[in-house]
């Protein structure tokens, strides 16, 4: 059951909508099901058509009487005195009678403080039903005694009462809110978008593009530049004393009011974490020794593009190791770290969606937009602690055109594990809205992975080594991981894994050493396709080992002895605790 509280200043206008045909003639049998004093109220839905207009005006005047008296006494208008709250059941809920809706309306006006039970001096209100699945509660927020009601936090209180009503009436239980959700588009905004042939309302369109721009940018100037390049009008607010920018607002292309003026939405109105202050926290300079130079430069070299995805995947594995180190003793400190990781992961999803292979971009965008809700909680992120991951995510913007699908699939496979861990964290915290959004984002992310992984695995399978080599690699699998051997060898991705093991051997890396290292990275019990999981682990590890050997060879002098190849399995969590991120080039 969903309540949606808003305010206005035109009682007559709202009544005309409630008792009218609707924007698309969807209203059926509008009538009052409950009111502050049912006797004496003339229901506009139950009068002859020739009396309908007069009945609406009479009802508006009746509801506004306390408002007019207060205005006469104070000598000024009462602002936003019309309180409006539609209450809708969830799809699939059972039919509710007028009597049940009447009880629901009385409970909500009581819970919000507008008209508590037994208070004869409360606000005047009515509840109108014009559809099977919802009612509209309308009140004038001046009490009979001339005072304004004590209804602070009315939206939150209405939500809490709806959760109790759902349980008592056997309705679908929806997730509790926590005050971090962005404002949803109004019915008028949705209708306007439909009239203009747009898929999403301007508010939602701006929010999605603002998040993507924030993920790509390194400072607020670059953020505004990216938005402007997208055709979005940017208007900044300047402090009169300091002369500094104190806020901003955005307008979508072609979004105008009836007078032809562009309609602007402030950043905080789009979403709480899009306010200028919250963005500045994200854009704050890193620790000394780290460059904050611009990231958005296109590098055509295919190897450099592949390396960008590999570096991001490596940092994601660091993140996943950290997320798996759940420790209740750390309390708030651990949760702050988790929120920082969630924020950095959200940026990476947006940047990956911009540069991934075209086949997976649609699902990746959906995953990023959905995860934006999972990224917002009451816990404030310390963005500086995730500088390395955020920078690795921004470097994906260099990887445009001709991407290595294996590197992309490897990153997406790791991203799936990270998102599962973040979902579990939200669930442990009781973040119902965020956990639900993370679960929905996971569906899109898995779909994006499938779009990228299937072709890459097929190409690897086509290059499976000969029977002699394959038999030898099969023996290696049975010897190194006997508990998983049958599942790995029976996995459809085994031919691709055999190819990757053979490639590692050609690069001078022992298949035994390589397989041992990647199996020890994380358990395989929960993997549906263990060979497929090992393909991406081994691809990433091979790239790391090869890069390490190249660096060692470059740095070696005749006086420098040859050093052993670094152990491929490192403690990602210990690297994080050391808090010494190094610059990525």
Image (cartoon, grey):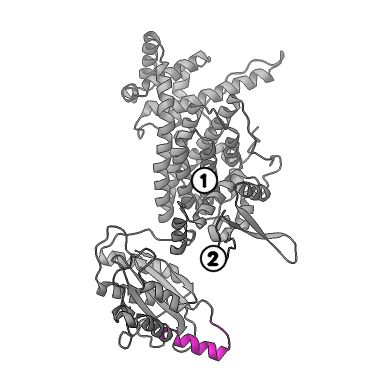
- Residue 86 rendering spot, x and y as whole percentages: 38, 69
Q: Helix, strand or loop at disc 1?
A: helix
Q: Residue furthest front?
A: 50
| Distance Cα–Cα, label 1 vs label 2 | 37 Å
Magenta segment range? Answer: 62-78
Would you say residue 77 sits in the magenta stretch?
Answer: yes
- The vertical placement of 395 against 468, above or below, is below
Q: Residue at x 54, y 91 (%)?
A: 73
Q: Residue at x 48, y 48 (%)?
A: 369
- Residue 397 rendering spot, x and y as whole percentages: 59, 37
Task: Give the mark toward the camera: 1 or 2.
Answer: 2
170 or 65, which is in the foreground?
65
Tell me if I can see residue 78 in this picture: yes
- The vertical placement of 421 against 122, above or below, is above
Number of numbered discs overlaid on the protein picture: 2
Reading the image, the residue beneath label 2 is 258
92 or 374, which is in the foreground?
92
**Image quadrant occupied by the N terminus:** bottom left
Reading the image, the residue beneath label 1 is 346
């Amino acid at each position: 059951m969903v309540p949606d509280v808003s305010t206005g200043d035109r009682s007559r206008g709202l009544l005309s909508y409630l008792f009218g045909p609707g924007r698309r003639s969807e209203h059926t049998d509008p009538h009052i099901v409950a009111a502050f004093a049912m006797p004496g109220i003339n229901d506009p839905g139950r009068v002859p058509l020739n009396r309908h207009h007069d009945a609406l005006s009479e009802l508006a005047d009746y509801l506004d009487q306390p408002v007019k008296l207060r205005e006469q006494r104070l000598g000024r208008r009462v602002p936003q005195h019309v309180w409006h709250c539609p209450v809708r059941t969830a799809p699939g809920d059972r039919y509710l009678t007028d009597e049940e809706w009447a009880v629901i309306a009385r409970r909500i006006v009581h819970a919000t403080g507008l008209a508590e039970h037994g208070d004869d001096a409360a606000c005047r209100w009515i509840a109108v039903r014009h559809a099977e699945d919802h009612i509209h509660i309308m009140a004038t927020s001046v009490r009979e005694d001339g005072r304004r009601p004590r209804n602070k936090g009315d939206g939150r209180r209405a939500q809490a009462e709806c959760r109790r009503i759902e349980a008592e009436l056997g309705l679908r239980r929806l997730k509790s809110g926590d005050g971090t959700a962005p404002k949803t588009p109004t019915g008028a905004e949705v209708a306007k978008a439909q009239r203009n042939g747009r898929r999403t309302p301007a508010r939602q369109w701006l929010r999605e593009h603002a998040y993507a721009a924030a993920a790509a940018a390194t400072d607020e100037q670059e953020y505004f530049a990216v938005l402007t390049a997208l055709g979005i009008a940017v208007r900044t607010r300047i402090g009169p004393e300091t002369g500094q920018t104190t806020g901003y607002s955005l307008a979508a292309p072609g979004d105008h009011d009836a007078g032809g003026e562009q309609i602007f939405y402030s950043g905080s109105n789009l979403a709480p974490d899009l306010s200028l202050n919250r963005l500045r926290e994200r854009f704050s300079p890193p620790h000394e020794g780290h460059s904050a130079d611009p990231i958005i430069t296109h590098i055509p070299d295919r190897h450099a593009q592949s390396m960008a995805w590999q570096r991001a995947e490596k940092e994601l594995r660091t993140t996943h190791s950290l997320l798996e180190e759940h420790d209740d003793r750390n309390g708030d400190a651990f949760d702050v770290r988790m929120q920082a990781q969630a924020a950095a992961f959200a940026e990476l999803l947006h940047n990956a969606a911009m540069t991934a292979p075209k086949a997976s971009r649609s699902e990746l965008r959906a995953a990023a937009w959905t995860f934006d809700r999972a990224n917002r909680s009451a816990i404030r992120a310390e963005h500086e602690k995730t500088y390395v991951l955020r920078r690795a995510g921004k470097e994906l913007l260099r990887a445009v055109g001709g991407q290595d699908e294996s590197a992309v699939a490897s990153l997406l496979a790791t991203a799936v594990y990270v998102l599962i861990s973040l979902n579990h964290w939200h669930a442990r915290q009781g973040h119902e809205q965020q956990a639900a959004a993370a679960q929905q984002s996971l569906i899109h992310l898995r779909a994006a992975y499938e779009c990228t992984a299937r072709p890459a695995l097929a190409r690897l399978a086509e290059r499976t080594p000969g029977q002699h080599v394959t038999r030898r690699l099969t023996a290696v699998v049975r010897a190194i991981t006997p508990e998983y051997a049958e599942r790995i060898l029976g996995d459809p991705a085994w031919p691709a894994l055999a190819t990757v093991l053979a490639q590692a051997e050609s690069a001078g890396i022992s298949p035994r050493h390589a397989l041992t290292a990647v199996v020890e990275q994380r358990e395989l019990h929960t993997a549906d396709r263990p060979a497929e999981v090992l393909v991406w682990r081994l691809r990433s590890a091979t790239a790391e080992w090869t890069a390490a050997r190249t660096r060692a060879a470059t740095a070696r002098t005749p006086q420098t002895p040859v050093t052993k190849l670094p152990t491929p399995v490192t403690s990602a969590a210990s690297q994080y605790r050391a808090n010494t991120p190094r610059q990525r080039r």
